[in-house]
Amino acid sequence: MAGATMMAVRVHAFGGPEELRYEKVPVPRPGPGEVLVRVHAAGVNPPDWYGRTGFANIPEAIRVALSLPFTPGSDISGEIVALGPDVTGWSVGEAVLGLVRFPSRGGRGEGYAQYATAPVTDLARKPAGLDHVRAAGVPMAGLTAYQFLYDHLGLGPGDGKGRTVLVNGAAGGVGHFTVQLAKVLGAEVVGVASTRHREFLAGLGADRFVDYTATPVEDVVRDVDHLVDTVGGPDAHRLLPVVRRGGTISPVFLGEYHRERAQRLGIDFRSGQVHSDGAQLAELVGLIDQGLVQVGVDSVFPLARAAEAHQRAERGHLQGKIVLRVAEDW
């Protein structure tokens, strides 16, 4: 495909959603250990809109430096159309999904495009029963939930029995996967979200629902073993009373948790940056293929309307994932 062009969304200046430009660019070429994927759908994630602003919402000391212009997007689902040097075990025509090169390149897998390159170690094969839109909603959010529960909390099959997991922001991308994976592990799950998400979370298996718009969760929940907080923010410390002594808090986003007070209460913090892992993604996709985990889709936008997708994201209160439809012929 030497000399070929494609349509992609690029950022030429940091700022609002209007800085996302739909334009013609060269098709990339896969390097060693990579494949070229014809992208059918791309997931929309917080690092995409954080990066669009130059990570203005991140403290300067830990801010990622981005060079302009760039193509955002780390979550892709599509079809392999070319193999790079030294690639074995993969074939042209295979349907794949992946969290691409995250967190390297400032989390830019360059997925908002008709074609994207990807290291094969970042990919998993897409089962036929999982369509591309839902598949594109899995990688970052699903792996975040998976790695928090399995890696950072060290839980395995059956380890959740007798434990309570509270998920704050339970209806969003990471939240709805965390609810389901905690149930797969055997835990009792408390989902915290706004009123309209009650039935959605019940359908995902949440044992208890707390409508934070009606009742502060800290007023009605106690003795939680594990709190996975997908909200964070300056008031995150209000959740300390819900966690038992010896329990854990896993923050997904930055928050003020009054950690010295938490230490006095015997609460431990366990979390980490989500990272690309094709093998773990394959295990997660296997659970989806078995019907044990569902992919919630909040909304779908054409690639050319990526700015509208970011506007939707910034309004918050999502129910599942936002996805960009890239290919129209499937």
Image (cartoon, rainbow, N blue to C red):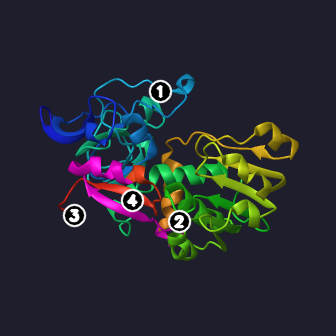
> Label 4 is placed on what type of residue?
Ala
Callout 2–callout 4 Cβ contact below 8 Å? no
The local secondary structure at tag 3 comes to loop
Density class for disc 1 (Cα within 10 Å; few <14, some 14-19, many ≥20) is: some
Q: CA distance from mark 1 to mark 2?
A: 33 Å
Is residue 302 toward the left or the right of residue 132 in the image? left
**Residue 43 image position (x, y, % from top left):** 37, 51
Which residue position is annotated with label 1? 64
Foreground of the two, 14 or 130:
14
Q: Quadrant of residue 178?
A: bottom right
Q: Earlier in the sequence, mark 2 or mark 3?
A: 2
Residue 202 badge: none
Which residue is at 75% across, 40% downward? 258
Which residue position is annotated with label 2? 287
> Label 1 is placed on what type of residue?
Val
Which residue is at 54% across, 71% downward? 195
Q: How many marks?
A: 4
Which residue is at 16% across, 41% downward? 6
> Label 3 is placed on what type of residue?
Trp
The local secondary structure at tag 4 comes to helix
Foreground of the two, 42 or 169:
169
Q: Earlier in the sequence, mark 2 or mark 4?
A: 4
- Which region shows up in magenta? 289-312
Q: CA distance from mark 3 to mark 1?
A: 36 Å
**Residue 64 image position (x, y, % from top left):** 47, 27
Asked whether residue 144 appears in the rendered view, the answer is yes
Which residue position is annotated with label 3? 330
| Residue 249 in the image: above or below residue 58 | below
Foreground of the two, 170 or 130:
170
